[in-house]
Image: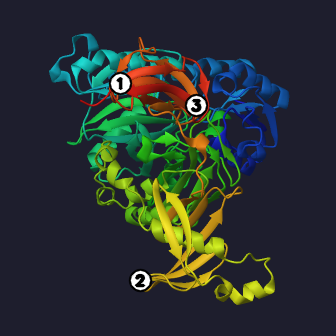
Amino acid sequence: MTSRISSLLVANRGEIAVRIFRTAHDLGLATVAVHSDPDADALHVRAADAAVRLPGAAPADTYLRGDLVIKAALAAGADAVHPGYGFLSENADFARQVQDSGLTWIGPPPEAIEAMASKTRAKELMRAAGVPLLDPVDPATATPADLPLLLKAAAGGGGRGMRVVRDLDALKEALRAASAEAVSAFGDGEVFAEPYVERGRHVEVQILADAHGTVWALGTRDCSLQRRHQKVIEEAPAPGLPDTLRESLHAAAVAAARAVSYRGAGTVEFLVTADGRPYFLEMNTRLQVEHPVTEAVFGLDLVALQLRVAEGTALPLTPPQPTGHAVEARLYAEDPAQDWRPQTGVLHTLDIPGQVRIDTGFTGGDTVGIHYDPMLAKVVAHAPTRAEAVRALAHALAGARIHGLTTNRELLVGSLRHPEFGAAQLDTGFYDRHLAALTETAPDAGTAALAAALAEAAPAPDAPLAARLGGWRNVRSQPQTRRYTSAGTEYEVQYHPVDHPGVRVLSAERHLVTLEVDGIRRMFHVKRNSNNTEVYVDSALGAHTITPVPRFPDPQDRTEPGSLLAPMPGTVVRVADGLAPGSHVTAGQPLLWLEAMKMEHRILAPASGTLTALHAVTGQQVEFGALLAVVQEEPQP
């Protein structure tokens, strides 16, 4: 019998650490956080009873240092360690070291983690257990008939080391790139290939097992809407599955858990083809990011159950019955229109209204740094029906005020309101088909710019009484001009206090402008950041970030034609073979690979020509806007 837990260290950061601390506090447990230097004032640190510094910034020096984490737990008097997800959560050696140190490990046995750690080994175990599998393909003997192929890192997940290959001529380079990314992410370059299923669904089963032989299959989740093989929107139960398929998925997941003597929470993931055939993908031996939708539907706290199972408590023989439907959206600091480019900087405002659950590691005023995943929050809606849950989630996200960083909020709202999603026509190719339409510039940016200009001209609350009482009658009678940019488009606003084509000013204050637009009353909430470089305008017409255009451009903003600048802070992980000043390059050719916020980004040649300068080397840390290389475009014939 495992001893009772009294103090819990979470070997993680961000929203999952905050979420685990919330349950721990509800159970009366003392809590201990660990943090890197950039996270010294992070929300998860503020949420814990005590915190221990892990010196450094990069994950390899901090959250991936199991020895330091265990030392922190012992020093702080914790008697248990919860790994969350990511980092060390599926590291069997770390689990053993936790147990060998006399601490309780909140997770499955190290042997089960080890058995499922390699996707190739896991597939062998599942084949023996009778779980359906896709047949592997040997890249060395692949033929056109085997295409398309999906390359996957044997040791990892989260989309790292994955490549889709549709041309045999590209297979060799794709294998090399996938292996290099796998080494960087997981320290293991093993890559395998299997058939890539077009328009398949990603369906998974949440399992929970105790030490007494009980294994629960807690329904299904659909996680088909993905970008870069990483999930964006998840829901439970997976809609539209025949009862026979649902039952077979439950049975296969339980068989997978029993095959490795599993204990605790885990997830068995499947690929379901368009004609309804399921194939085992992998087993995640940890809590999943999307676990809240299962919690909502079953009325459970999976973290509380993890803790009780770790203490030796037996589960009831059967789980509770599910009710209703839940949908979760992952809010990321990223720009979907720019190849999902992660964003860094100050998150000035994070305010999401409505009857929704919000799991986050940030509050307004926090900084989103370069070292970690750019997820800001998970937003979850639960309702009696799928349609009601989807509608509630879309409404909450549409009404959110998120200032300071570009996010995927508009993409999420558009996805939830898309006819295909509404009809539960789900598959992993959704964004391949619809991304361009979903990332079009939001309409009415011109009206938002007008609201920004009116708010800027409004008297301040502490202005003299005469100015405030006089209102618009005291301003100049001639139209005023302001220039702004929004989403790359420049708007010149000529405004007059009371006269605008199609628009009537009902009131204008520094933070709230009310306009009648084409006969419809609209309220525009206006907020400026601390240094007045950006204005945020939120209304029922959408959210816009408006940047005032300086009257005189800064000469330092000019760069040499053909300059390749770092689109974000990060690390140069690779330079194209043989690339050197004087090399000839072609438009669109990958020249450099930059890793930032757990994602790899290619820096492409902007045009065909000659590389005249190369300032980047492998392993180099670069800041946003750093000059990486210069390409001199060849003259057009």
Query: Which residue is disc 2 drawn over?
Result: 518
Disc number lying in front (3 or 2): 3
* Amino acid residing under circle 3: Ala
- Image vertical order of residue 518 relative to residue 31, above or below: below
| Sooner in the amino-acid sequence: mark 1 or mark 2 | 2
For the C terminus, give its image quadrant: top left
The quarter holding residue 364 reads: bottom right
- x then y, percent, for residue 359: 60, 51
Query: Which residue is disc 1 drawn over?
Result: 609
Disc number lying in front (1 or 2): 1
Disc number lying in front (1 or 3): 1
Answer whether residue 614 is visible to the viewer in this image.
yes
* Amino acid residing under circle 1: Gly
For the N terminus, give its image quadrant: top right
- Image vertical order of residue 506 relative to residue 590, above or below: below
User: SS class of the residue under badge 3?
Assistant: loop
Work out how far the residue at label 1 is from the one at label 2, CA to CA, in angstroms. 51 Å
Answer whether residue 262 is visible to the viewer in this image.
no
Residue 424 left/right relative to 530: left
Q: Which mark is residue 626?
A: 3
Work out how far the residue at label 1 is from the one at label 3, CA to CA, in angstroms. 21 Å
Residue at 53% x, 16% y: name it: 187
Mark 1: few/some/many CA within 10 Å (<14, 14-19, 20+) = some
Instruction: Report the front residue among 329 and 180.
Output: 180
| Sooner in the amino-acid sequence: mark 1 or mark 3 | 1
- x then y, percent, for residue 18: 68, 45
User: SS class of the residue under badge 2?
Assistant: loop
User: SS class of the residue under badge 1?
Assistant: strand
